Amino acid sequence: MIRIALTLGFGLALALAAPASAQLAGEVFIHDPSTIVESDGKWYTFGTRGGGLVSSDGWTWASGPVRPGGGVAPDVIKIGDRYYVAWAVGGGGMSGGHKSDVKIMWTKSLDPKSPDFKYHEVGIVASSDGVENHDAIDPAFLYHDGRLWLSYGTYFGSIRMIELDPATGMRVAGNQPVEIAIDMEATALMYRDGWYYLLGTHGTCCDGPNSTYNIRVGRSRSPLGPYVDNMGIPLLRGGGKLVVSARGRMIGAGHFGLIDLGGGIEKFSLHYEADMDRSGRSVLAIEPLLWRDGWPVAGSNVRPGTYEIKSERSGNALQLKVDFVRIPFDARRAWMAKPGDPVSPVADQTLADVQAGWPKDAVRVDLSAYMVRPNQHWTITPVPEAGGWFGAPFYKITIAGTERALAATPANEVEAVPAFTGADAQLWRIDQLTDGSYRITPKRGAKADLALMAIGTSTPTLAKFDPRSDAGRWRFMQP
């Protein structure tokens, strides 16, 4: 809306999340982005004043898609063969007023080049008269179990919920708005495991690096509430559990939009009021979404660093399959040492201690107990010029201190090649799953839905990812 606001690894960290400027490429400037939706093989989001962004991969975005009507803070949902768009005209405190209308229109395609691209205006579904304690803007859809809901409102008064007819987009005859929250705006709705979730943006907006926007959530067994947070505080009394706030140099997190990509991967879109590396402008961002104890919380992309890559299935570590080299150690002396004998550290095995014995060509990888060895330490490095996928760049994965790169083979196995060349077989997607673990997918095999999988306790391979199994889940651990 528009409202003027009076894991450490060799010294590097697996931190909260990379800044949005490091996540997305292209033209990412937008305010109040709608929920990202797919149409004709591309992904779309729309913002205040009628503009929008389009992407073929969720990584590189361009401005261009347009919707009629102007106004503020739209939302989009696909039901059947229609894309419904809700937006508001007026209100928001602009020119000192809170008189506003929420309108609905629909089209069968969001691509202006498609023969199905044509917007049809349905009409007004909610209003505020400028006198009552309410401002009818910032609409958000939820379609569940055959019913279509719309939340709307801002800090000026309450958040309200109405029911729409999914066949027409019009308000259900006789339906009256229900007040469900206060002290928030830019709401969003989700349903999961018997719970309805209301996410709203708290804080101040539209003041660049001084904005305090943050996204909070409550839940209810009914779409009409009562919504309460994790401490039992009703959202009608200002409650809300934090989902995401400012991160690094990204200030003012607002306008949540769920992106369910399937296979255990859920992400969400938002805008940051100020990207401090992009002149403090409002930008689109995409973050992983985790679920903890029934509550949504922002996840994290992998930060550049060196890690043990641990299999969730067995707990074993991904490693080069090379001969085991012992660390010099006198076991008899250790067993016979007296309690008062002096002690000193045992030095870590170094790359120089073992590398000369490694094969010069490609080496298979396997899984084994983690022993803090050089063949078990992997450096994760984003390769931004190689592109990315929904909020995360493609990465190269190399043995620490070397250019030996993890690669997919033509037979859908994995090996470490002598040097990184930038080939698709050496580029990897690393997506955080809803439980906090990660899925590792080769760029070359992404369309085939192949992922790095553990067969038993010792064998990694590339196979179809199963979100119900731990075989394709990995953790990045401090060496």
Image: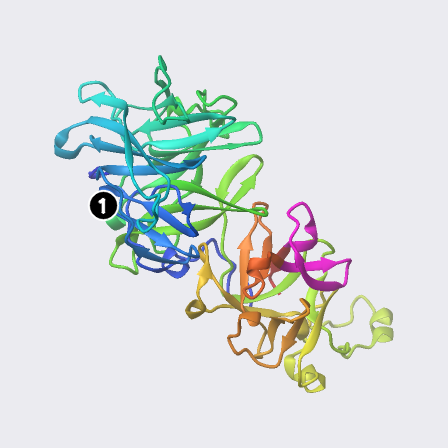
Give the image location of residue 441, x and y in percent. Answer: 58, 60
Give amino acid for label 1: Asp
Q: Nearer the viewer, residue 220 or 259?
A: 259
Task: Note whether 20 is above or below 186 in the view shown.
Answer: below
Residue range in magenta is 451-473
Q: Residues within 10 Å of mark 1 (few under 14, many from 20)?
A: some
Residue beneath the point at 61% across and 60% down: 477
Task: Note whether 360 is above or below 260 in the view shown.
Answer: below
Residue 35 belongs to the span the image colors magenta: no
* Quarter that holds the C terminus: bottom right
Residue beneath the point at 37% across and 27% down: 150
Q: Name the quadrant containing residue 24.
A: bottom left
Give the image location of residue 340, x and y in percent. Answer: 78, 68
Give the image location of residue 175, x and y in percent. Answer: 36, 15
What secondary structure is found at the residue carrying circle 1? loop
Task: Note whether 205 is above or below 439 in the view shown.
Answer: above
Q: Nearer the viewer, residue 324 or 81?
A: 81
Q: Name the quadrant containing residue 83.
A: top left
Q: Nearer the viewer, residue 285 or 109?
A: 109
Q: Is residue 346 visible?
A: no
Residue 453 belongs to the span the image colors magenta: yes
Q: According to the image, label 1 marks what residue?
A: 207
Residue beneath the point at 42% across and 27% down: 166
